[in-house]
Image: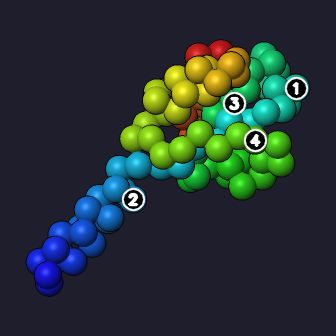
């Protein structure tokens, strides 16, 4: 029982290190290219989004941008928090 609790604490910590929560901006007019920018919870823009859709937890921006595209957004990674997925 104690070991299970110990392991679940470790798993919880690992998950919080490896995963981040992502949001896509529904307002594409704020982007010069008209893209729906994807941000993670570590980004300054994340908490400033007023019109967004929750994408979920991902290990990196690649999955998050794919999820946003699947939902029909013209998604692109934010240059600040998702430089790996920032295409334009
Ligand atoms: Zn961002």
SS at mark 1 in the image: helix
Mark before the other along the chain sequence, 4 or 3: 3
**Quick one: label 3 or label 1, which is nearer the N terminus?**
1
Q: Is residue 27 left or right of residue 58?
A: right
Instruction: Tell me which label, 1 or 2, sits earlier in the chain.
Output: 2
Viewer-closest of 10 and 41? 10
Which of the 4 image quarters holds residue 58? top left
Q: Which residue is mark 2?
A: 16
Q: Is residue 82 visible?
A: yes
Where is mark 3, residue-wise? 37
Q: CA distance from mark 4 to mark 3?
A: 10 Å
Q: Is mark 2 within 8 Å of ligand 1?
A: no
Q: Position of residue 4 (x, y in %)?
A: 16, 74
Which dot, 4 or 1, sits closer to the camera? 4
Q: Identify the residue at horizontal 64%, vertical 24% (top origin).
A: 71
Q: Earlier in the sequence, mark 2 or mark 3?
A: 2
Neighbor class of circle 3 (other Cα within 10 Å; few <14, some 14-19, many 20+) is: many
Q: CA distance from mark 1 to mark 2?
A: 32 Å
- The answer for how far apart the CA atoms under marks 4 and 1 are is 13 Å
Give me the residue at 65% from left, 44% from top.
54
- Please tell me whether residue 48 is drawn above or below residue 4 in the rendered image: above
Q: Is mark 3 within 8 Å of ligand 1?
A: yes
**Mark 1 highlights which residue?**
29
Instruction: Estimate how packed mark 2 is, as few (under 14), some (14 to 19) or many (20 or more) residues with alpha carbons within 10 Å.
Output: few
**Residue 52 has which mark?**
4
Q: SS at mark 2?
A: helix
Q: Give the x, y percent position of residue 24.
A: 68, 36
Q: Position of residue 22 (x, y in %)?
A: 57, 43
On residue 60, the disc is: none
């Amino acid at each position: 029982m104690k070991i299970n609790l110990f392991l679940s604490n470790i798993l919880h910590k690992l998950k919080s290190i490896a995963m981040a929560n992502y949001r896509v901006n529904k307002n594409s007019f704020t982007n010069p290219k008209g893209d729906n920018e994807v941000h993670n919870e570590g980004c300054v823009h994340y908490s400033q989004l007023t019109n967004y859709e929750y994408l979920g937890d991902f290990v990196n921006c690649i999955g998050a941008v794919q999820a946003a595209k699947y939902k029909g957004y013209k998604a692109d990674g934010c240059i600040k928090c998702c430089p790996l997925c920032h295409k334009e």
